[in-house]
Image (cartoon, rainbow, N blue to C red):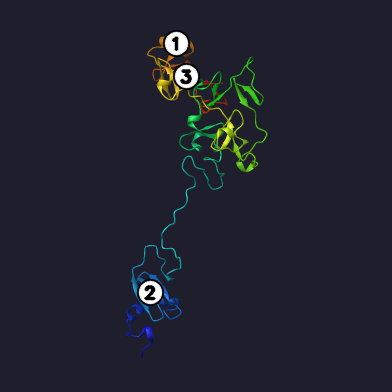
Amino acid sequence: MNFGWFSATSRFATVSVALAATGALAWGGCGSSNNGSYCDSTGCYQCDGYGCSSTGTPDAGTDAGGPVTADSGADTGKKTPKPDAGTEKGDAKAEAGKPVCGGTHGPCACTTTADCSSGEQCVSGACTPTADVCQFSSQCSGTDVCANNQCVAACGAQMPCSDGFTCTSGFCKQNAPQNTCTTSADCPGTAPYCVSGSCALACTGDAQCPTGDYCDQGACVLDTRPTPDCSSTSDCKTGQICQGGFCLYTCTTNLECEQIDTRIGVCGTGNVCQSAAEASPQCTTQSDCQNGLSCVSNVCQ
């Protein structure tokens, strides 16, 4: 008697028996209504309306125990790469549950420098390029001082601060903004980026920002950057070298420095003349100070 695909003389008989033995036919056999492919512990099989033939061993991640059609999209054990939570320095960061920042979306908020990308420091609650922060007051222009890594105006009884600033520990500190924010979602379209608790204007260049501000990663912020005065030693006076963008007098003894200027009377690190506070700083960032004190001209006060 001939039972079609299950015939002992059928060229598919051996495979069909194996499928039956392993339970491969439990899902309905390989009749005309069950075309497709199937994998189990014994191998993989292609079925049509007449029978099944072996197609080889199953892949490591193939789901055995049920039919898998050629276009079923079944999981083969391969993992789809997940997109990065954040991108490299200079691009906008977009982490789950966090606002987009950096790149051209305004500086990212931070509590410590560990919150920032490589090449940035946490300054006044915002991730700022290291090139845009100061360590010494000598890096600031005029009578400005380096306070908490920002070049700001010095102040005192004879040196009042401008409107919008308050004299604190010898430097002019910007008053708390009225349009306070926690994230950029709190800000209006006219000033879309939240930077250090204040909603900032969007920009692509310094010329688009108000006087006294500069364009920092797409947002207009107060310009507290140091003021480099050289790009090479040829830009400096005789007896000076260009170091980190600043012309500094070279020395071998303190006496040499005192004779140049008593304010830089110490022959410090790198054999250049420095102030006593620069040569032996009590602090270089606000985090070096305790009890909420500020780091002003390398002294906690």
Q: Residues within 10 Å of mark 3 (few under 14, many from 20)?
A: many
Q: Given contact means CB atoms under 8 Å apart, are the residues at marks 1 and 3 in contact?
A: no
Instruction: Assign a secondary structure to mark 3.
Output: helix
Image quarter of the C terminus: top right
Residue type highlighted by circle 1:
Ile
Mark 2 → mark 1, Cα distance in angstroms? 92 Å
Q: Looking at the image, is mark 3 or mark 2 earlier in the sequence?
A: 2
Q: Which residue is drawn at 64% across and 25% down?
A: 165
Figure check: 180 above or below 25: above
Where does residue 163 sit, x and y in percent of width and height? 67, 24
Which residue is at the front of the view, 14 or 161? Answer: 161
Check the image and name the residue furthest to the bottom.
Answer: 1
| Mark 2: secondary structure | strand
Q: Quadrant location of the N terminus?
A: bottom left
- Mark on residue 46? 2
* Image coords of residue 36 (percent x, y): 42, 74
Q: Distance between the residues labelled 3 and 2?
A: 79 Å
Query: For residue 278, which numbered disc appears in the image?
Result: 3
The amino acid type of the residue labelled 2 equals Gln
Residue beneath disc 1: 260
